[in-house]
Image (cartoon, rainbow, N blue to C red):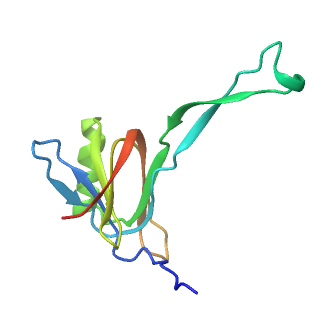
């Protein structure tokens, strides 16, 4: 029997590029949960008057790269908060990169669509960041 190759997400990083050439990425501080892009495929009904056995036929349409999100410890005025606030103010597409514990990277363009800090009475402050992915993601290896 082969041993599992499963791994935990500990050690993963989420970074945002500065748009320069060459692009410089800055890790967002204190990220503790990352949900990578959720790729889906449109399905188009291609049924016609002579479809075999009067059964619907379908073809694949465009891919939708979906959204990516991450959760972080919220430190008002801290490095992570400042980076997200700057991105929110700029209202621009940025290059994002997820680095997994085995150094595989997913790099993609995204638009910041949500920033939700929370300050509960008796627990740590957190923030959820949501990014609409635009275009395909590229898989690579961290250097």
Residue 4 is left or right of residue 135, and the answer is right
> Looking at the rendering, in which quadrant would you find the N terminus?
bottom right
> Looking at the rendering, in which quadrant would you find the C terminus?
bottom left
The residue at the point 14 percent across, 52 percent down is 24
Question: Where is residue 49 shown, x and y percent of the image?
Answer: 83, 12
The single residue placed furthest to the left in the displayed view is 21
Q: Nearer the viewer, residue 123 or 115?
A: 115
Position above or below: 32 against 81 = below
Q: Quadrant of residue 47?
A: top right
The residue at the point 58 percent across, 38 percent down is 41
The single residue placed furthest to the top in the displayed view is 49
Q: Quadrant of residue 113?
A: top left
Position above or below: 56 against 123 = above
Q: Nearer the viewer, residue 114 or 98?
A: 98
Q: Nearer the viewer, residue 1 or 47?
A: 1
Residue 52 is left or right of residue 17, and the answer is right
Q: Is residue 78 visible?
A: no
Q: Is residue 94 visible?
A: yes
Position above or below: 45 against 79 = above
Question: Where is residue 102 shown, x and y percent of the image?
Answer: 34, 72
Question: Where is residue 31 shown, x and y percent of the image?
Answer: 35, 67
Q: Nearer the viewer, residue 76 or 10?
A: 10
Residue 67 is left or right of residue 73, and the answer is right
The residue at the point 84 percent across, 23 percent down is 52
Question: Where is residue 53 shown, x and y percent of the image?
Answer: 89, 25
């Amino acid at each position: 029997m082969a041993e599992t190759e499963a791994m935990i997400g500990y050690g993963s990083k989420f970074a945002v590029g500065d748009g320069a050439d060459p692009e410089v990425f800055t890790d967002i501080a204190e990220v503790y949960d990352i949900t990578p892009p959720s790729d889906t495929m449109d399905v188009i009904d291609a049924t016609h008057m002579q479809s075999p056995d009067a059964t619907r036929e379908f073809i694949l349409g465009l891919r939708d790269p979906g959204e990516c999100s991450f959760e972080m410890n919220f430190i008002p005025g801290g490095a992570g908060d400042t980076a997200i606030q700057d991105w929110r103010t700029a209202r621009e597409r940025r290059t994002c990169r997820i680095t997994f514990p085995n150094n595989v990277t997913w790099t993609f363009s995204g638009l910041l669509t949500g920033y939700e800090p929370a300050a509960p009475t008796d627990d740590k402050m957190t923030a959820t960041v949501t990014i609409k992915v635009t275009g395909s993601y590229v898989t690579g290896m961290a250097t």
